[in-house]
Amino acid sequence: MESKRQHKFSRQIHKDISDIFQKDPKHFFGNSLVTITKVDVAPDLSLAKIFFSVLPIQQGHDVIEHLDILKSEIRKKLGLLIGKRIRKIPELAFFLDEQEEKASYMDQLIDSLNIPPAPEEPEEE
């Protein structure tokens, strides 16, 4: 269960990281369309896990690798934005959010099932 402090901090990091990426998206993502889907913060606020959804999906791992290379630059920019409100800037970890892919796969599986109609039951009077 996430505490109020963690929740508040994760929302703030989500907003600030989004602002950082919006200022220069080509530098961070190239030609990919990226959305930050979720930010999880450790209870001691020392680690922020940032989850992304990437389109096209095939470039997802490339985007995450590129962000790992730029991690110190992103953390520095984040520190300039939230440095007055928190003592220590959290370490950043980037992850690919595959929830939509899994949901799409499950939809395809369900659609491909051949389920016969239920037998008609005689009506009782």
Image (cartoon, helix red, strand yellow):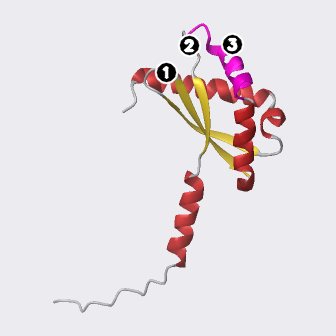
Amino acid on which disc 1 is placed: Leu
- Tell me the quadrant of the picture where the C terminus can be found: bottom left
What label does residue 88 carry, if any? 2
N-terminal label among 1 and 3: 1
Viewer-side label of 2, 3:
2
Are the two marked residues, 1 and 2, in contact with CB atoms closer than 8 angstroms? Answer: yes
What residue sits 75% from the left and 38% below the top?
Answer: 66
- Can you say whether 50 is above or below 19 in the image? below
Residue 60 is covered by the magenta coloring: no
SS at badge 2: loop
What residue sits 48% from the left and 84% below the top?
Answer: 114
In the picture of the structure, the residue carrying the numbered disc 3 is 80
Give me the C-alpha separation between circle 2 and circle 3.
Answer: 12 Å
Amino acid on which disc 3 is placed: Leu
| Majority secondary structure of magenta residues | helix
Badge 2: residue crowd in 10 Å (few <14, some 14–19, many ≥20): few
